[in-house]
Amino acid sequence: MADIKTPHRPLFLREEELRYSIELMFFAYRDFTSEADTHLARVNLGRAHHRVIYFVGRNPGINVRDLLNILNITKQSLSRVLSHLIDTGYVRQKQGSADKRQRLLYLTQQGEALEHEVTRLQCQRFARAFKSVSDESVTGFLAVMESMLDEKTIALLRHPPISKKQDP
Amino acid sequence: MADIKTPHRPLFLREEELRYSIELMFFAYRDFTSEADTHLARVNLGRAHHRVIYFVGRNPGINVRDLLNILNITKQSLSRVLSHLIDTGYVRQKQGSADKRQRLLYLTQQGEALEHEVTRLQCQRFARAFKSVSDESVTGFLAVMESMLDEKTIALLRHPPISKKQDP
DNA sequence: GAAAATAAGTCAACATGGCTGACATAAAAA
DNA sequence: TTTTTATGTCAGCCATGTTGACTTATTTTC
């Protein structure tokens, strides 16, 4: 994969490019999240709530353990936001049928509405960005972002908790 | 800039691609920062301290207002971490000569050492990622990340608080 | 030269979202 | 039957963001 064709970009240029990338990462992530944060604040939810809503929406029927695995936080931290989301009617729980210890998580209609709205905003930003560059740039972006991930995260992406096929 | 040549990628594919990008943003940023966080924790500093050290290192002699403008936090928030960094010898202040109200910020030797070490780690991650893809992918990554920024952030990047030339 | 604006700092209180440790209950697995 | 697992809960701590109010120099403006 490492390309031989790269001749020898001078070191200082590489250094500058790398530092610039660090800064882009910081600023792009901040701008990216702040838009969603603003929207969520209007319904008195924070970023942590959004993450739960997003990943439950993405994996309907996910159990708590798998969700914790994705979020990489403690169950006590999750408990706080999840309880609130259940109390306020964004998420509902269902006892697992195979394993009755499990509480499977689903979005309510209200939860789906919010998820769609925030995801729409975030997709819009990416869509705008993607439209302003070439297809190859988009491919390049995806390739670099994937290469930034830890092994553990890659495994997570490759083995989603619930097969996309089995939910109706 | 919007390219006409994009024919018509099917909508569901675009949707999936956009959602995948959202997730990459979340996971890549998390993996990216967690490595630095671990290192900083060893010297009892957090992410907020690191940001200050990074941007002061990047803009030696920056004043408080400009730093606040970059970080986009309140002065009370900055005060907490900045005071701590001064107390523990990572940052020093110097009264401005033109405007004596200003406190210009510089890294100490200790501050520079830490900055270098953490930046080295983060650069390493980008260098590894960049090496594993083509040059065009790197260019594409940079292009997309730039397109993700808010106008205000772009202005910030284009008008750094201190001209890089004038510091010795 | 007086008044207003600006740069910086400080105190107090509060919100969010991480964390640890300890312990409980039900169900599945060994 | 014992052990392990999935989930939840209480209590408290920490980092880092927020608002609001007020002070002190210094510079700018009228």
Image (cartoon, coloured by chain):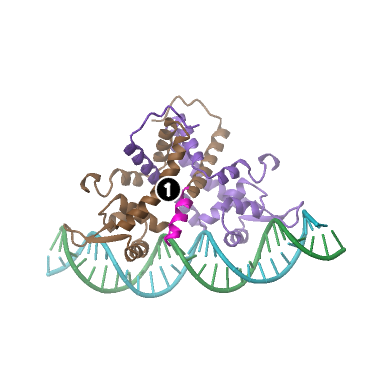
Chain colours: A brown, B purple, C green, D cyan
Q: Nearer the viewer, residue A15 or C12?
A: C12
Task: Using the rendered image of the protein, determine whether residue B132 is visible from the camera's viewpoint.
Answer: no
Task: Using the rendered image of the protein, determine whether residue A75 is visible from the camera's viewpoint.
Answer: yes
Q: Nearer the viewer, residue B131 or A96?
A: A96
**A20 lies above or below A102:** above
In magenta segment, residue A43: yes
State the residue position of label 1: A121
Within 10 angstroms of label 1, few (less than 14), some, or many (20 or more) residues?
some
Residue at image coords 53%, 56%: B48
For the image, the number of numbered tags is 1
Secondary structure beneath disc 1? Answer: helix
* On-image quarter of the C terminus of chain B: top right
Q: Position of residue A62 (x, y in %)?
A: 26, 54
Q: Position of residue B54 (x, y in %)?
A: 57, 49
Q: Position of residue A76 (x, y in %)?
A: 35, 64
In the displayed structure image, the side of residue A109 where residue A127 appears, left or right = right
In the displayed structure image, the side of residue B114 where residue A127 appears, left or right = left
Q: Position of residue A3 (x, y in %)?
A: 42, 28
**B139 lies above or below B45:** above
Q: Chain of mark 1?
A: A
Residue at image coords 39%, 51%: A117
Residue at image coords 46%, 41%: B125
**B76 lies above or below A140:** below
In the displayed structure image, the side of residue A161 where residue A54 appears, left or right = right
Instruction: Give the image quarter of residue A67.
Output: bottom left
Range shown magenta: A32-46
Instruction: Give the image quarter of residue B13.
Output: top left
In magenta segment, residue B150: no
Magenta segment, prevailing SS (helix, strand or loop): helix
Query: What type is the residue that disc 1 sits on?
Result: Leu
Q: Nearer the viewer, residue B116 or C15?
A: C15
